[in-house]
């Protein structure tokens, strides 16, 4: 447990950010699994949106998200999912 005031603050900030990151990652996993279980245009859109949000927050790199979105699009094409 830190004693220095700035270290205490840093610890609180880290805990808050960690919780936010965990929530974002969970949302990505849930959206991706929902699309994989039942491919549809709405679930594809939601999964891609979650990936974009993660990039915006700095949780994922841009190319990582792009690669995952491409894999989702490929799966959507194989399942004959039409985008709206």
Image (cartoon, grey):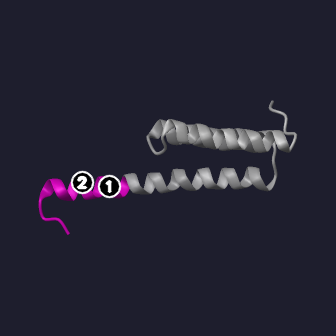
Question: Would you place residue 62 above or below residue 6 in this image?
Answer: above
Between 28 and 5, the one nearer to me in the picture: 28
Magenta part of the chain: 1-16
Q: How many C-alpha atoms fall within 10 Å of the one at disc 1: few (<14), some, or many (≥20)?
A: few
- Location of residue 3 by image quarter: bottom left
- Residue found at the far right of this picture: 80
The secondary structure that most of the magenta stretch takes on is helix
Say the numbered circle drawn on residue 69: none
User: Quadrant of the image for the C terminus?
Assistant: top right
Q: Residue drawn 57% across and 37% down?
A: 52
Give the image location of residue 36, x and y in percent: 76, 53
Between 50 and 68, the one nearer to me in the picture: 68
Give the image location of residue 17, x and y in percent: 38, 51
SS type, badge 1: helix
Q: Residue drawn 82% across and 39% down?
A: 77
Alpha-carbon distance for marks 2 and 1?
6 Å
Give the image location of residue 40, x and y in percent: 81, 44
Circle 2 sits on which residue? Answer: 10
Circle 1 sits on which residue? Answer: 14
Q: Residue drawn 53% across and 50% down?
A: 24
Query: Would residue 18 appear left or right of 10 to someone viewing this image?
Result: right
Answer yes or no: do the residues labelled 2 and 1 have beta carbons within 8 Å?
Answer: yes
- Residue found at the far top of this picture: 84
SS type, badge 2: helix
Give the image location of residue 39, x and y in percent: 81, 47
User: Quadrant of the image for the N terminus?
Assistant: bottom left
- Location of residue 51 by image quarter: top right
- Residue found at the far left of this picture: 4
């Amino acid at each position: 447990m830190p004693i220095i005031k700035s270290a205490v603050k840093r610890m609180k900030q880290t805990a808050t950010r960690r919780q936010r990151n965990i929530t974002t990652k969970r949302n990505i996993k849930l959206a991706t699994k929902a699309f994989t279980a039942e491919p549809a245009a709405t679930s594809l859109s939601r999964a891609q949106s979650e990936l974009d949000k993660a990039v915006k927050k700095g949780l994922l790199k841009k190319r990582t998200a792009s690669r995952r979105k491409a894999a989702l699009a490929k799966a959507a094409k194989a399942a004959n999912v039409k985008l709206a």
